[in-house]
Image (spheres, rainbow, N blue to C red):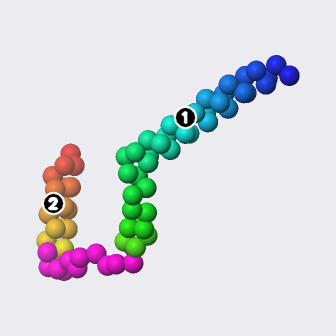
Amino acid sequence: MSIIYVLIPIAILLTAIGIYLFFWAVKTDQFEDLEKQGFSILFDDEKVDPQKKSQHLEKNKQANKEELP
């Protein structure tokens, strides 16, 4: 029975933290545009020129080789 004296304050504290975080999220516009992320996976990214991509990969390879001892 004495465990109730510990669990009730913990439950109240966690509830208060949850309510605070919810109001913080609403205040900082975390719920402003919920559909944007869902639609973003439906659209393709900008197309990358294969020549520029290969040049970028070569630069990365050279940079990685220089970093290794």
Q: Nearer the viewer, mark 1 or mark 2?
A: 1
How far apart are the alpha carbons under marks 1 and 2? 50 Å
Disc 1 residue crowd, few under 14, some 14–19, many 20+, Cα 10 Å: few
- Specify the segment rendered in magenta: 41-52
Give the x, y percent position of residue 53: 18, 74
What type is the residue that disc 1 sits on? Ile
Marks counted in the figure total 2
Q: Which mark is residue 62?
A: 2
Q: Quadrant of residue 54?
A: bottom left
Does the magenta stretch mainly form a helix, a strand or a loop? loop
Look at the picture and state if 12 lies above or below 18: above
Q: Quadrant of residue 1?
A: top right
Disc 2 residue crowd, few under 14, some 14–19, many 20+, Cα 10 Å: few
Q: Name the residue located 13 percent from the left edge and 71 percent from the top edge.
A: 55
Q: Name the residue located 65 percent from the left edge and 30 percent from the top edge.
A: 12
State the SS at label 1: helix
What type is the residue that disc 2 sits on? Gln
Residue closer to the observer: 38 or 30:
30
Q: Give the residue pinned by disc 1.
A: 17
Give the left or right position of residue 21, taking residue 50 as reference. Answer: right
Give the left or right position of residue 3, taking residue 51 as reference. Answer: right
